[in-house]
Structure formats: structure tokens, C-alpha cells
Amino acid sequence: MNIYAFIDSQNLNLSILELGWRLDFARFRVYLKDKYNVNKIFLFIGYILENEKLYYFLRRAGYILIFKPTLIANNEKIAYIKGNVDAELVLHSMVEFSNYDKAIIVSGDGDFYCLIEYLENRGKLHSVLIPNPRKFSALLRRFWKYIIFIDFLRKKLGKQ
């Protein structure tokens, strides 16, 4: 069975950081392979030139990186980098649709409701891995039987 994972890296990383720990992405890759027999993992991430070492590490760990150009945005005089990857994740999951039997979506973002519903209706939803059990979209509660909370794996997946 071909199982692919599609990861919203910003939602994953920021949610885990809010919980006070850091995800070991190499261990997470091994976990997905060992636990779910995932064949391909697509990591959707905003591109920042200064992060080339990170991208190299992620590729070596086994992720397929899908980049989104980033913008510098201002919010109340604070500059931050904006690189929302939602559209790219949905597009690539549909482009790859005939290549996988089941999909794992990694995000707690309700913007993926329609994608998750589509996958479920076609028998292709394996699971939804949500980083933060206390802070995720209420829209995703409908898919409760598919939800796994990454925070509960903190000891196994956290940086040492």
C-alpha cells in the first residue's frame, strides 16, 4: 500500500514551539516510515535563502520539499515572514492523488477541511496528525477517528 504524508510545516513547527518543545524532524521522518509505512513525505515550507542548511538537512532526512515564495509582512510595526502553504499542499495532494492509496495530513488548520473530507469520501484518508491538542480548528473534530495528536509523542519525537 502506498501511503503519502503531506505536511504543513509552518503549522507543525509553530504549534510544537507554542507547546514548549522542538520537533526532531529526522526522528519524525523515521516515525512516519516505521509506524505508518509512509512511502513519500511532502513538506510544504516557505523559502528563505538563509535557510539553505535547513533545507539540505530536511532533504537528507528524506523529505520532499515543496517551496512557497515568502513575503515580508508588517503587523503592528513588527516585520514577519509570510509563507502560507495551504494552496500548495492541496494542489500537490491532488496532483499525486492517483499515486497513493492513503494520505496522512499533518496540520491542525481548518483550511484543510475540504481536502480531508474529499480524501475521506474517496477512502484515501489514513489519518490527520495534529500538533497541538489544545489549539486546532474545530472543523477538524468531524474527523476525530482519524486524528492523532503529535504532542502526545513529545518524548519520542522531541529534540534531545
Image (spheres, rainbow, N blue to C red):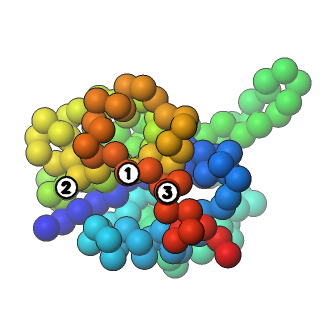
**Left or right of 84 in this view: 88:** left
78 vs 61: above or below:
above
What residue is disc 1 on? 148
Q: In the figure, residue 76 lies in which quadrant?
A: top right
Is residue 46 in view? no
- Of the two numbered discs 3 and 2 in the rendering, the one whose residue sits closer to the viewer: 3
Q: How far apart are the alpha carbons under marks 3 and 1? A: 8 Å
**Left or right of 154 in this view: 137:** left
What residue is disc 3 on? 152
Of pointers 3 and 2, the one earlier in the residue sequence: 2
| Amino acid type, mark 3 | Phe
Q: In the figure, residue 51 lies in which quadrant?
A: bottom right
SS at circle 2? strand
Q: Are marks 3 and 2 in contact (CB under 8 Å)?
A: no
**Left or right of 74 in this view: 114:** left
Foreground pick, 35 / 74 = 35
Location of residue 23 in the rendering, given as x and y in whole percent from the top left corner: 60, 63
Location of residue 63 in the rendering, given as x and y in whole percent from the top left corner: 45, 68
Q: Quadrant of the N terminus?
A: bottom left
Foreground pick, 110 / 6 = 110
Q: Are marks 3 and 1 in contact (CB under 8 Å)?
A: yes
SS at circle 3? helix
Q: Would you call the spot at circle 2 few (<14 residues within 10 Å), some (14-19), or many (20 or more)?
A: many
Q: Residue at x 33, y 76 (%)?
A: 34
Q: Residue at x 32, y 71 (%)?
A: 35
What residue is disc 2 on? 102
- Of the two numbered discs 1 and 2 in the rendering, the one whose residue sits closer to the viewer: 1
| Amino acid type, mark 2 | Lys
Q: Quadrant of the C terminus?
A: bottom right
